[in-house]
Amino acid sequence: MSGLTPQYDPDLDAKVKKATERISENMHIVANEPSLAFYRLQEHVRKALPPMVEKRVDVTRLHQRLQGHCYDVEYAISAVKSMENADRIFVDVQDLLRNAIFLRQQLKYEESRRQKKEPSMSVYKRLSAHITLDLPDLPELSDALRETASKVESIMRHSEQSTSNS
């Protein structure tokens, strides 16, 4: 095999020369033009940074809202847990309300029985029974007193009727 001599391939020779020229050119660019690399980096940062910052702000805002919702949920859970024993209290309140309604009905019944047994005396008559004044005989004053007394009696009857109806 020592007798074999490599054959010259012009196509391979052209490809090797072209590849070495490109490598040499790239080395020259890298060695002499570092500002081009920085320019490409700056261009990339200028394009990519604002959307990234905006997304980070959005994520921070969402995190704060999520944290607020988590606090709300924790508060709601603690409120529900504190209400677990409330059924006993509600039953007690319900019993107290029943008792209050029953007592109110008894009071209304007793009031209606008393009103039927005792003739109602007007407020004016009850008041005048306690007041002993000797007023001089003034016809204008007595007419005004009678008119006022009748108005007070009618107001009292009206209020008694409205309370008994409700």
Image (spheres, rainbow, N blue to C red):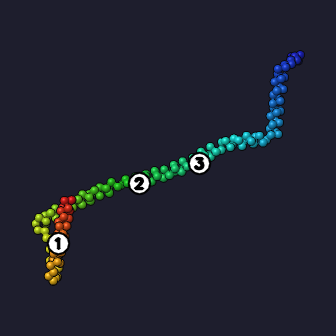
Is there CB contact under 8 Å for labels 1 and 2? no
- Residue type indicated by callout 2: Ala
- Residue type indicated by callout 1: Glu
Please, what secondary structure does the residue beneath circle 3 have?
helix
Q: CA distance from mark 1 to mark 2?
A: 62 Å
Residue 97 % position (x, y): 26, 58
Q: CA distance from mark 2 to mark 3?
A: 33 Å
On the image, which quarter does residue 39 sit in? top right
Task: Give the vertical position of 96 relative to 16 (above or below).
Answer: below
Which labelled disc corresponds to residue 57? 3
**Residue holding disc 1:** 147
Q: Earlier in the sequence, mark 1 or mark 2?
A: 2
Residue 7 % position (x, y): 86, 17
- At 83% across and 23% down in the image, what residue appears? 14
- At 75% across and 42% down in the image, what residue appears? 38
Is there CB contact under 8 Å for labels 3 and 1? no
Q: Nearer the viewer, residue 113 or 149?
A: 149
